[in-house]
Amino acid sequence: MATPEFRLYNTLTRRVEPFAPADGETVRLYTCGPTVYNPAHLGNFRTFLFEDLLRRTLRLRGWKVKQVMNLTDVDDKIIKRAQEQGKRISEITEPITEIFFRDLEYLRIEPAEVYPRATEHIPEMIALVQSLLEREIAYQAEDGSVYFAIARFPGYGKLSRLDTRSIRAGARVAADDYNKEDVRDFALWKAAKEEDEAAGAAWDSPWGRGRPGWHLECSAMARKHLGDTLDIHCGGVDLVFPHHEDEIAQSEGATGVEFSRVWCHGEFLLTEGAKMAKRVGNVTNVDGLREAGISTSAFRHFVFSTHYRKQLNLTEVALEASVSAVRRVDEFADRLYATRGGTAALAVAADELEQDATAALFDDLNAPEAMGALFTFIRKANAELDAGGKGDGELERARNAFGAINKVLEIAPIKRLPGEVSMSPQELIADEETAFDRGVRDWAEERVAARRAARERRDFATSDAIRKELESRGIEIKDTASGTQWKKVR
Ligand SMILES: [Zn+2]
């Protein structure tokens, strides 16, 4: 089968365009990461899942991917929180970073190749500001801060296509704006205040003590880890202006070459006004998903059921529909791997799946259509498995096609035949036990132990309450002579 053309929507040109990495081999991908002062919310994870879909699809196409996702670990909000709690910024950001990585694993988001921290790239940021000063598109203000001079960079506004005159008219003049030559100018380097020093958020620079501006972090870290020109730069649609516009200005201002060939942006997840009283409650982050018993597969299915450039509503009805859809996928996967042979029509259905799903994914990541092809295949394949069949090759064809497409969407745990060993650590995790299963197991074992302790102190009210709590999450327990056993029944 001929490989369909790979196409992506480029925010820079507002068109779906053919895409290939500049060197024909490795896609250099930069994805704006979280500001680690609060656990990321599900809206952030919709963006990270779209980027996961992108990297898996690029690899399906046969390219390698080098993805960089920054961790913003110095910023106004982090410093404010540190100040409130009398802490240093690292004491705020480290535990949140740990939660972020745990959440990524729960959602089975493939790890990026590099997760650079802003605080570990201060020299690179200073060097970038210096080049901008040398080229006279930045200037130092009286207060010691360094600003980017928008008027001296003619390309400003090419990504967001905002009229720079309207930016000027709408800009609010804040106190520190009195130091700027032009209210539109943005800070590259901020002179340190007392609270920055107290929180450990100030560094030496040629312009005195200070800290980097947010936009500067991404420009410096992208350049260090991926070079002057990226293949693709991604983020949520809310980052187009000013964040990405400012990244372009800084990077292109300093290097004189194009910063990113393609810009991709994921749309919002709408959670406001969602009525989710019954089972889902007010789920806003990954912990909430885990507590509501929404599995990784179900959430991935929910997110991929809408194209990444369309807004998505988080509703209980949609989540429940995804829960039952992935149950069908899971049952089918079990059946496909337990069966012993296939029919000729099964192999034909497998070819169709691979062709249709690949074509959909390569066409600007059309995951809803790819999932449609997968469910069509499941329907046809179930009928063929009912019919029986003895063909080894046909069965293998079906398993390969299902495995290849599920490896991109991952809406069912990846399954393999016994004896097959070529697995990455990521796949091993998914294969043995899903992160969701692990979460449930840890929680259930902790509750069973708490119940045992309650029984030992003859506190039967607590013991009963814990049993009910377990049952409400679909876990059944049985007391036996050798201890309490539990199993998941839902
Ligand atoms: Zn960024």
Image (spheres, grey):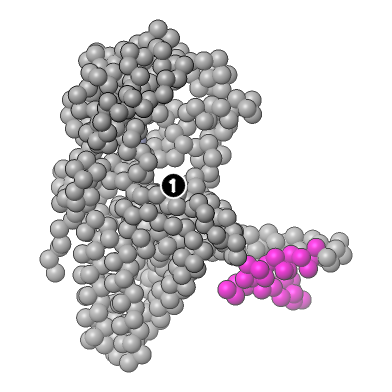
Residue 474 among magenta residues:
yes
Mark 1 residue crowding within 10 angstroms, few (<14) / some (14–19) / many (20+)? some
* Part of the protein shown in magenta: 462-490
- Looking at the image, the residue that sits furthest to the top is 142
Q: Viewer-proximal residue, 314 or 37? A: 314
Q: Viewer-proximal residue, 59 or 7? A: 7
- The residue under the point 56% across, 27% down is 80
- Looking at the image, the residue that sits furthest to the left is 2
> Does residue 232 appear in this view?
no
Q: State the count of labels.
A: 1
- Residue 266: give x, y in percent of width and height: 34, 49
Q: Is mark 1 within 8 Å of ligand 1?
A: no
The image quadrant where one finds ligand 1 is top left
Q: Viewer-proximal residue, 173 or 336? A: 173
**For the residue marked with disc 1, what is the amino acid?**
Asn
Q: Which quadrant, please, contains the N terminus?
A: bottom left
Residue 315 among magenta residues:
no
- The residue under the point 22% across, 33% down is 158
- Residue 203: give x, y in percent of width and height: 45, 17
Q: Viewer-proximal residue, 176 or 455? A: 176
Q: Which residue is mark 1?
A: 44
Q: Give the left or right position of residue 478, taking residue 287 as reference.
A: right
- Looking at the image, the residue that sits furthest to the bottom is 387
In this rendering, the answer to whether 35 lies above or below 316 is above
Q: Give the left or right position of residue 42, taking residue 396 as reference.
A: right
- Residue 215: give x, y in percent of width and height: 36, 29
In this rendering, the answer to whether 125 lies above or below 53 is above
**Mark 1: secondary structure:** helix
- The residue under the point 31% across, 40% down is 30
